[in-house]
Amino acid sequence: MGASELIGSRAEPSLCGGSGQEEGCLACEVRPISVCGALQPAELLELQTMAERRTFAARESVAVQGERSEFIYNVTSGMFRVYSLLPDGRRQIVGFLLPGDFFGLALGERFTFCADAVVPSTACCFRRAAFSTFLDRTPHLMRRLHEAAAHEMTVAHQHLVLLGRERAERRILHFLVTLRQRWARVCGKASVTIPLPMSRADIGDYLGLTIETVSRTLNQLARDRLILIVPNGIRLLDIAAIERLAGEG
Amino acid sequence: MGASELIGSRAEPSLCGGSGQEEGCLACEVRPISVCGALQPAELLELQTMAERRTFAARESVAVQGERSEFIYNVTSGMFRVYSLLPDGRRQIVGFLLPGDFFGLALGERFTFCADAVVPSTACCFRRAAFSTFLDRTPHLMRRLHEAAAHEMTVAHQHLVLLGRERAERRILHFLVTLRQRWARVCGKASVTIPLPMSRADIGDYLGLTIETVSRTLNQLARDRLILIVPNGIRLLDIAAIERLAGEG
DNA sequence: CGTATCGTTGAAGTTAGTCAATTCGAGTGG
DNA sequence: CCACTCGAATTGACTAACTTCAACGATACG
């Protein structure tokens, strides 16, 4: 083994974003990558009046399946998981939210899913009613939201393909490749080290696998010298090979 | 076996809908259950000018992954399947479209999935550009479309739960229960006999199973006297038990 | 009546799940 | 600083579920 110089490359999740609360929407660090990027300065000032930055502790709940959805959220830092709970306690994570991602787009009266913070995180909260009327006055934001929803739909469909038709190794690889791309968007540049703030159980519940299978598969990939497992993350050692094995990516 | 009096209860898929072409949107048989139901008579007349009823033969293609999406469609009779093809020929069906369902909601420039007719079917076609401008002038239709998209999202998430966390029997049962509800909406009343115009291969590709597993599971359910397999359909013999076994349904 | 396709059934093989033991790492208190 | 504890991650042995491969039966169609 003895690759001690490789170890220690901790995936420190700056998880981008940060404070900036005081400065309002104009100075928002996720605006360029979020739906808010569609807005003019004047509109941002108006949006700001109905926005409130909230902090969430790790595991703190954002939404509970079936409860009334008073707010919608725009993630500004950290990571959230969106999931469904089955009566017997099993869980299916349908997605992880990164900075710039919207939650509550499907503006039904009630949340159809649970969501909570994976790590300490922040999000911008909007009262649904206020946001909704703002939306009516701002058709280009509506468009942008619709595009975001369409993209979410495409992502969900790819997730379906993964769960329905791929085996464990490809699920894991696809997950890593996709997550890398999403981090790249958030951080402005692609990194070979992917922060994985979520647990193996989370990954398993996202990919329809058990923790044991996730662990075995990751360690097999590490033995094959495709990845390196670092604290709180994964370093991709051979991105070309990984993307090839993952399918289209 | 000798339940010959039960056999012969063919699931004749009137598959509801039918002609009505000549009479226009006002007389459209799927309007009450479709997004068009949100429109006023005057608006329907306008919509009608950009609508064209098209007929599709079984297996005729509606959309091909990656191609430009010139039209969007509203299913008026029959059934379509929406799917993704993998490079090695495997297929994941992400959904079946019934009368009243919209296709092409995610108004990207290109189709992200394939779609074709399962049986001879008809659909109302709208040129995307024209429909899009109509949408801008008709915010309540936009709302309704957005709600439909949100519902699609919820359905996709439930599908994810199914593929990620349920075994074959529950996938099949859930599929039957859900399809029954959808037919009920289309036909105006719930029936114990569910038309299944699609093949076992289609069901398998929808549920992430092989044809063999679909066949074995269905026949096991028939042996357990929960269902009866009839030509082109399934009759549910014990709906209460089926819904219990399927989970929340 | 022959052929093609679809569906069913059986047997063998694989993958991932289950159960259980062990290790690792972070945090705690002596 | 070290022992202890707790949860997360890893690893192994075994098992269940589903797939694969193969053969066969039914049905529709020319």
Image (tube, coloured by chain):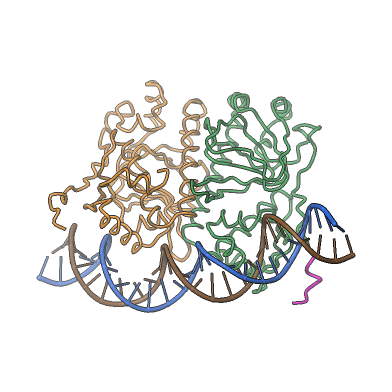
Chain colours: A green, B orange, C blue, D brown
Using the rendered image of the protein, determine whether residue A86 is visible from the camera's viewpoint: yes
The answer to whether A172 is drawn above or below residue C22 in the figure is above
Quadrant containing the C terminus of chain A is bottom right
Quadrant containing the N terminus of chain A is bottom right
Using the rendered image of the protein, determine whether residue A195 is visible from the camera's viewpoint: no
x, y percentage for residue A10?
Answer: 77, 60
Residue at image position (58%, 48%) is A95
x, y percentage for residue B45?
Answer: 37, 24
Residue at image position (40%, 40%) is B73
Q: Quadrant of residue A148?
A: top right
The answer to whether A157 is drawn above or below residue A217 in the figure is above
x, y percentage for residue B132?
Answer: 49, 34
Q: Is residue B138 left or right of residue A29?
A: left
Q: Nearer the viewer, residue B235 or B111?
A: B235
Q: Is residue B222 left or right of residue A62?
A: left
Is residue B199 one of those drawn in magenta? no
Q: Taken as a whole, is the magenta stretch helix, strand or loop?
A: loop
Magenta extent: A1-9
